[in-house]
Amino acid sequence: MAHNTSPTPAKPLSGTADLPAGVQANVAGAGASAASAPPAACVPLDIDQQLCFAVYSTMLGLNKVYRDLLKDLGITYPQYLVLLVLWERDGLTVGEISERVFLDSPTLTPLLKRLEAAGLLTRTRSSQDERQVLIALTEEGRAMQQRAAHLPQCVADASDTEMSEIIELRDRLLALRARMARKSG
């Protein structure tokens, strides 16, 4: 039996046609002030209607694109994220890197050890606080930044999307992430 993998077209969330009957009645009976305001959106429990699935499935596609691109550099996507952080600001602690890439220390430490074994960074204990490990790029790690400079454009090309659209989408996702972080405390 063949499985249809094409996504179901998204149903519009404006208007009341897609809302449950009880909600439609509440919207209709709410008076003139509610008539100008859009009704509360009720997203059906359909996988293709879920934001979480859209983000998740898009990330799977992005991971595949990055996996292919990063193969030439000999690094993984999480390693690339760490290098991006260090290219912005070298000499960070494991904790500072962890906060930036949203990985906990037990996940990050083996990744850093692999980058160190590859000659891309060094890990040294802080002389001021031995509990802290400082991460610094090697010359080879700094040189890799030039070799990776083309990646953002390659991702835009692979997604058949203009860079301006990618930047707009990124900004909207960052704003959503910030709102969710504020809301969850």
Image (spheres, rainbow, N blue to C red):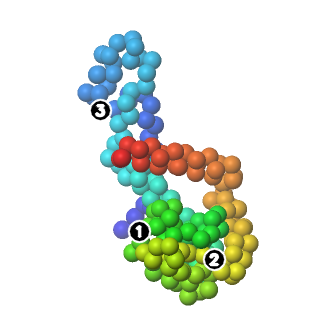
**Mark 1 vs mark 3: which is more N-terminal?**
3
Mark toward the start of the polypeptide (1 vs 2) = 1
User: Within the image, what quadrant is residue 105 found in?
Assistant: bottom left
| Residue linked to disc 3 | 20
Instruction: Report whether residue 20 is seen.
Output: yes
Residue 61 appears in the picture as rendered: no
Alpha-carbon span between mark 3 and mark 2: 57 Å
Query: The N terminus is located in which quarter?
Result: bottom left
Report, in whole angstroms, how far the alpha carbon at label 1 lies from the one at label 3: 42 Å
Amino acid type shown at disc 3: Pro
Find residue 123 and report its horizontal and vertical position in percent.
Answer: 54, 80
Q: Label 2 belongs to which residue?
A: 137
Q: Residue at x 50, y 83 (%)?
A: 113
User: What's the residue at 41%, 17% (across, down)?
Assistant: 35
Q: Nearer the viewer, residue 18 or 183?
A: 183
Element class at badge 2:
strand
* Rendered position, 160 above or below 174: below
Give the vertical position of 28 relative to 43 (above or below). above
Residue where numbered disc 1 is placed: 104
Query: Is label 3 or label 2 in front?
Result: 2
Locate residue 147, reporting x and y percent.
72, 74
Residue 133 image position (x, y, % from top left): 49, 76
Question: Is 19 situated above or below 57?
Answer: above
Would you call the spot at circle 3 few (<14 residues within 10 Å), some (14-19), or many (20 or more)? few
User: Within 10 Å of the Cα at label 2, are there few (<14), some (14-19), or many (20+) other Cα atoms?
Assistant: many
**Residue 129 pos. (x, y %):** 46, 73
Q: Of helix, strand and loop, which one carries label 1?
A: loop
The label on residue 147 is: none
